[in-house]
Image: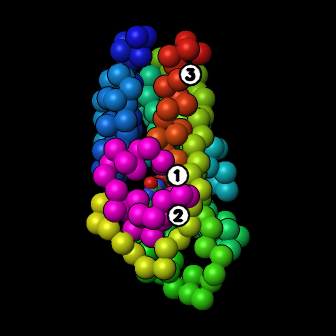
């Protein structure tokens, strides 16, 4: 299998992301080295643009091939909020603040979006996107994962991401989908 010879760095300061991505890549036969670093928090309404700029910055610091990832939670009834501002919203009002905003709201559809910025050995950058549809639960459940995991239930499931093991979350998650599409592209030699 060609994938066995693939190796890349994943630049992230987020333990939860590292756990998910390292397990996924290892199951796909891709070797992955963590670079534990925080990059500049670029402000943009477009996750793919944030991921692209982060990949360029990371390439300048660490060289390629490497991946960075930017993700967000988009709640339909809140007009897509917090979206690209999910990290700030999580740090400020957190899960309980989000649930407060959803008090009395019947339509609880939401999705997570992940944008993976990949810089190859020569610094050429591409972005891969993954999405998972679901809904915001009425109350937090589970102790696994990170961020908004305790209140996100993927479509056709009853458990929140925080009630799932890492491998189970990887079956559904936006992040796993984006990284799978990166790996498929690399395995096809693109
Ligand atoms: P960032 O990619 O680090 O900017 O992530 C933005 C924020 O979105 C994080 O701080 C989390 O609160 C939230 N988030 C992103 N991905 C996930 C996930 O897989 N589960 C739960 N929350 C997430």
> Label 3's element?
helix
The x and y percentages for residue 173 are 48, 48
Q: Is mark 1 within 8 Å of ligand 1?
A: yes
Residue at the bottom extreme, as displayed = 104
Q: Quadrant of the C terminus?
A: top right
The x and y percentages for residue 120 are 51, 21
Residue drawn at x 64%, y 44% is: 49
Determine contact: label 2, label 3, CB under 8 Å: no
N-terminal-most mark, 1 or 3:
1
The x and y percentages for residue 56 are 54, 33
Comparing 125 with 153, the one in front is 153
N-terminal-most mark, 1 or 2:
1
Q: Quadrant of the N terminus?
A: top left
**Label at residue 86:** 2
Res 133 quadrant in image = bottom right
Q: Is mark 2 within 8 Å of ligand 1?
A: yes
| Residue on which disc 1 sits | 71
Mark in the foreground, 1 or 3? 3
> Label 1's element?
strand
Q: Is residue 168 above or below residue 27?
A: below
Is residue 169 something one can see in this rendering? yes
């Amino acid at each position: 299998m060609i994938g066995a010879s693939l190796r890349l760095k994943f630049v992230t300061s987020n333990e939860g992301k590292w756990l998910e991505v390292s397990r996924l890549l290892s199951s796909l036969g891709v070797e992955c080295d963590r670079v534990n670093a925080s990059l500049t928090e670029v402000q943009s309404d477009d996750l793919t643009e944030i991921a692209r700029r982060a990949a360029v910055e990371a390439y300048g610091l660490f060289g390629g091939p490497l991946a960075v990832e930017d993700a967000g939670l988009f709640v339909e009834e809140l007009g897509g909020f917090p979206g690209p501002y999910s990290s700030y919203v999580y740090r400020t009002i957190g899960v309980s603040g989000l649930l407060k905003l959803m008090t009395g709201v019947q339509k609880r559809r939401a999705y997570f979006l992940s944008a993976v910025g990949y810089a190859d050995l020569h610094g050429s950058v591409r972005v891969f996107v993954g999405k998972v549809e679901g809904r915001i639960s009425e109350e937090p459940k589970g102790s696994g994962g990170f961020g908004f995991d305790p209140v996100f239930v993927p479509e056709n499931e009853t458990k929140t991401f925080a009630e799932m093991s890492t491998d189970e979350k990887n079956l559904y998650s936006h992040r796993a989908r984006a990284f799978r599409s990166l790996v498929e592209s690399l395995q096809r030699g693109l």
